[in-house]
Amino acid sequence: MAISIGQEGDEDEVVSAINTTPLVDVMLVLLIIFLITIPVVTHTVPVDLPKETNQPRQTKPENIELSVTRDGGVFWNEQRVAGNEQLVTQLKAIAVAEPQPEVHIRGDGAAPYEHVGRVVLACQRAGILKIGFVTEPPPRG
């Protein structure tokens, strides 16, 4: 076996193989960078997030259902209330009961918020402690 160096008449051979050493070096550097930066990016502040529990509540007979229509009419358990002062008077009468019943407000979807706000204000003026809003559940799926 002999090595020929610089002999006349030899033509340089064309190397058809790709040199992958620089490619491997670049890939290793990128891998190291990703391994170092990923734990920093995924680090978050530990927070206890609330759990969603949407269980339908049973309506007790002593609970008060107040319905608000589009035109601002207020119904107390399906009976129309004449005015805001009468509503406050009726709510004050039940506010002294032990245990105090809950007031469930059903507002029409097309009713302005002002009408529902008047009912909430009447409940506050009467001293009602538990007010709930009745809504339709979102569609499943």
Image (tube, rainbow, N blue to C red):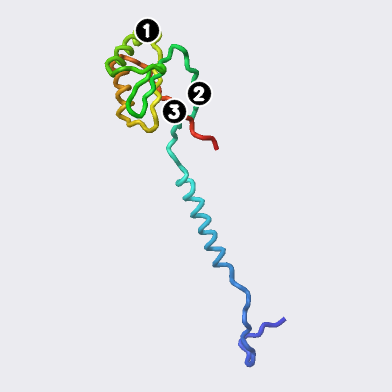
Measure how far apart labels 1 and 2 are at the Cα level: 25 Å
The quadrant of the rendering that contains the N terminus is: bottom right
Question: Circle 2 sits on which residue?
Answer: 56
Q: Determine whether 86 is above or below 26 in the image.
A: above
Residues at marks 1 and 3 touching, judged by CB atoms closer than 8 Å: no
Question: Circle 1 sits on which residue?
Answer: 97
Q: Secondary structure at mark 2?
A: loop
Dot 3 or dot 2: first in sequence order is 2
Q: Say which residue appears at 51% left-offset and 35% top-offset.
A: 139
Question: Circle 3 sits on which residue?
Answer: 135
Q: Determine whether 2 is above or below 33 in the image.
A: below
Q: Say which residue appears at 62% left-offset and 82% top-offset.
A: 14
Name the residue nearer the viewer: 131 or 45: 131
Residue 128 appears left or right of 134: left
- Look at label 1 and name its amino acid: Ala
- Look at label 2 and name its amino acid: Pro
Residues at marks 3 and 2 touching, judged by CB atoms closer than 8 Å: no
On the image, the x and y values in percent for residue 98 come to 39, 7
On the image, the x and y values in percent for residue 113 come to 32, 30
Residues at marks 1 and 2 touching, judged by CB atoms closer than 8 Å: no
On the image, the x and y values in percent for residue 135 come to 44, 28
Which numbered mark, 3 or 2, is in the foreground of this view?
Answer: 3
Q: Quadrant of residue 67?
A: top left
The local crowd at label 1, few if under 14, some if 14 to 19, many if 20 or more residues have their Cα within 10 Å, is few
Name the residue nearer the viewer: 73 or 19: 73
Q: Secondary structure at mark 1?
A: loop
Dot 1 or dot 3: first in sequence order is 1
